[in-house]
Every structure is written in structure tokens, then in C-alpha cells.
Amino acid sequence: MKNLWPIFLALSCVPTLARAAVDPKCEGLEKPVDYNEQVQQDFLQNYFALATSYSAVHGPLPHKAGRGAVLLGLSVLPPLGCGKRFVLGWTKTEETNKMPVMPRPVLSFALPVQGPVVPYGSFSYLPPVTVGGTRNVFFGVEVGVGWALHEHFELGLRGHATSLRTIADVATAFDETDPVVLDFYNATTFGADLLVGLRFGDVAPYASLGLMDVSSFFLVGDDNVVVDNRHPYAGLTWASGVDALVGERLRVGVELFGAPGGVHQVDPAGITLSPSHRYGNLITGRLRLGVEFGSEEKQPPPI
């Protein structure tokens, strides 16, 4: 899990290019005429926040009223190509692809209420377990309501938030003889989604459209320099998937999640980011698998 997050951020503060290295797979790739170091930094800070955000991975009604589930969620972190790995004026590449999947436990529940509207919520927490010299802590929460508008049609609204913290030597030194110094990376996301879904018994295909805001913070431990994210992602998100109850207790959700780009911005230095996806663009897959719990109570009728 070494170098999981935006390693290059701290390196941009180093005044020398000594021992800068390029991945052999990326050698010979020409520097784009519109390459900008700040844009590259902002993209990676936003990218890993979006990749670990807290999308639904369920339909408008995740459970019948009074039921819930204990789940394991898996979020795919798509590998970045060479064009997004170059830093320091296109003189060095970073290894951003060492962690293909991020796991996170999830507790999900729907309140035992009577009526056409079912409130629900979920929590996710990954404790600070150190693996490969990197300690990651993740917390996610969602609250929402779902309506059964028809026997086969559902509608829902949800809000969600996450916090991801990484403590590790992510700003690696140029010289392998230098001491290991820990750095700190924090990313938070906030968002809201509108969900629509169909229901065929215990199988519920769904789609969602939402808005998400990203904030990030990176502290270089060697010199206590804070690297700015001048263009935090603020824009649309979408998702499409299938949520199903297999048998009586096995809950399965599969989802394709995307963030196409945020609002058009101009940074304080006058750098115009056009198109806007230069600082935030992602398509990834997510999976949840777990055990359903709760009694088979009488469910509210559709509206």
C-alpha cells in the first residue's frame, strides 16, 4: 500500500530533481503542450477522494422496513495511465497503482416504520490498521428515504459524507538513505443523490444522479509544508447497478460509479481549466456482499 495517495504532491516542493526516475513503461511519452503542475496535483488529490467516496450500491429502498445488513464493501481504485503519473514538470513518474481495491465494512439498516416512506441509514468504518507502512482510516455515513410508488417502481433521496485519512511516508525521498518521515493526507466528500429503481421481487436494478463536493489536505512531514488543492472537485456524479437479496439472508450489490467532471473554474494564478474534467474524472466499480438481518414484518403498501 506504499505510495497510495498523491505522492507527487510533496515532491513538487523539493528544490532539486536529483535522482528523478521515470517508469520504463512511460519512457518516451512526450509532455503535453498544456501540461500544468498545479492541474496535475489537483487531479490526483481529487481522484483518490472520488474513488473512495460513499455511493449507494443499493436501490431507493435498500431493505424492507425493520431490516438491515452487515456487509463488506469493495471499491475499485482504477489504475492511472502514464499521463497522470508524471510530476515535477514531466521529469518523474510516481507509483499510484499499488492498491487496486479498498475494502470497508458497512452496517446498513431501514427503520421499522409504517407508511409509504421508509427512512434508512448506514455507517462504514475502516480502523487504523497499518499495512505496508501505511495507515488508513475511513469513515462513511449515509441517511436517506425511499418510497414504493408502485409494486415495481421506487424513488429515493440520500445524503452521504466520508472522511479518509492516510498517515505514512507517502512523499518518498529521492535518496534511499534518507530517513523515513511520515506525511498526512486527508480527503472528505459530501453529496446528495436522487435514486430511481425498479423492483422484481428481491431484485432491484437502479440508477442515481447526484452532486458531490471534495475537500483535501496534504501535509509534508519533512518540512511541514501544506500542498494546496486549488480546484477541489464540485460537480455531478452518477451510478447504475443492481441490488438483490439472494435466498433469505445473502445481500449482494454491484454498481458502476462515475464522476464526469466538476464546475469550470479559474485558479488565483489565472490557470483556466477547460475542459473541467482535467481536475476530476472517474469511472469505477463497487461491490457489497453481506448478511441480511431482521424479521419479516408486514411491509407498507405502495403509495
Image (cartoon, rainbow, N blue to C red):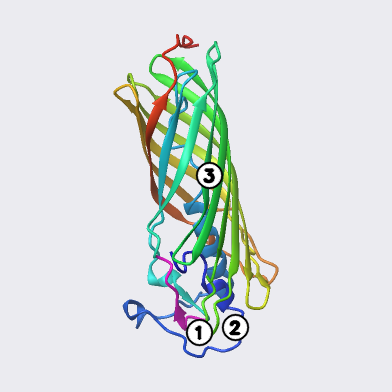
User: Please, what is the three-letter code of the amino acid marked with disc 2?
Assistant: Val
Q: Does residue 125 lie above or below 10 as drawn? A: above
Q: Residue at x 41, y 56 (%)?
A: 77
Amino acid at pointer 3: Tyr
x then y, percent, for residue 23:
37, 79
Q: Nearer the viewer, residue 22 or 262?
A: 22
Magenta region includes residue 100:
no
Question: Which SS type dominates the magenta stretch?
Answer: loop
Q: Are marks 1 and 2 in contact (CB under 8 Å)?
A: yes
Is residue 211 or residue 285 the one in the foreground?
A: 285
The residue identified by callout 2 is 14
Residue 278 in view of the camera: no
- Residue drawn at 40 percent across, 27 percent down: 292
- Point 44% across, 33% down: residue: 70
Residue 169: % across, % down: 53, 71
How many residues crowd mark 3 within 10 Å: few (<14), some (14–19), many (20+)? some
Specify start and end residues of the magenta stretch as a single range: 89-97
Indicate which disc, 3 or 1, sits on the residue closer to the N terminus: 3
Which SS class for mark 3? strand
Which labelled disc corresponds to residue 174?
A: 1
Can you identify the residue that label 3 sits on?
A: 125
Nearest to viewer (mark 3 / mark 2):
3
Instruction: From this view, report whether residue 205 is shown above or below residue 165.
Output: above
In the image, taking residue 232 as reference, residue 203 lies left or right, namely left
Q: Quadrant of the N terminus?
A: bottom left
Q: Residue furthest left?
A: 247
